[in-house]
Image: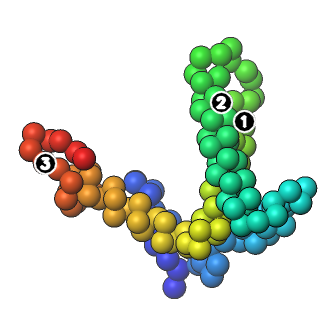
Amino acid sequence: MGKQLSFGMFEKEFDDQEGVLDTHLREVINKSWNFAGRCKTYDDHVQNAVLGLVGEAGETADQVKKWLYHTEKPGGHHEAKLKSELGDVIYYWRKLVELCGFTVEEVLATNKEKLESRHPELGKVSERFGNGYIK
């Protein structure tokens, strides 16, 4: 029996022995991580992951800006570039999750709890105080 995932209006059932992000970590990220050998300590690895993550998030934002405000390019150019940058964000995010000793499931569950506490459309709001203020 597969797991049922729900992403907004999209639902997908899949058989997940390891998880796509865990497979990507094992088959791609860990094989290519620290190729230059410059990360010598745990702190080096964490700093590399964090700086890589924020750098790629910035490149993702820049790609969205180009898609929206620069000259249009044919053949899905902007979509392909955005997909590439989002993949880079996942690369560093997934490595940071591992370095912190978390599982993807733990991070997503914690994020879900936080969002549920703030968004009435998710069913339970615990952070609202008078006149719709959200802390």
Q: Residues within 10 Å of mark 1 (few under 14, many from 20)?
A: some
27 is higher (above) or lower (below) than 38: below
Residue that mark 1 sits on: 81
The reply, left or right, for residue 7 in relation to residue 46 is: left
* Label 2 vs label 3, nearer the camera: 3
Q: Identify the image's colour scheme: rainbow, by chain, secondary structure or one colour.
A: rainbow
State whether residue 133 appears in this view: yes
Of the residues shown, which amino acid type is indicated by label 3? Phe
Disc 2 and disc 3: Cα gap in Å? 37 Å
Where's residue 102, x and y in %? 55, 72
Marks 1/3 in contact by CB < 8 Å: the verdict is no
The reply, left or right, for residue 34 in relation to residue 58 is: right
Residue that mark 3 sits on: 129
SS at mark 3 in the image: strand
Residue that mark 2 sits on: 63
> Which residue ends up furthest to the left in the rendered image?
130
The residue at the point 64 percent across, 28 percent down is 62
Q: Nearer the viewer, residue 105 or 43?
A: 43
Q: Earlier in the sequence, mark 1 or mark 3?
A: 1
Where's residue 113, x and y in %? 34, 64
Where's residue 115, x and y in %? 33, 55
Of the residues shown, which amino acid type is indicated by label 1? Lys
The residue at the point 72 percent across, 43 percent down is 84
Q: Earlier in the sequence, mark 1 or mark 2?
A: 2
> Which residue ends up furthest to the right in the rendered image?
36
State whether residue 13 appears in this view: no
Of the residues shown, which amino acid type is indicated by label 2? Gln
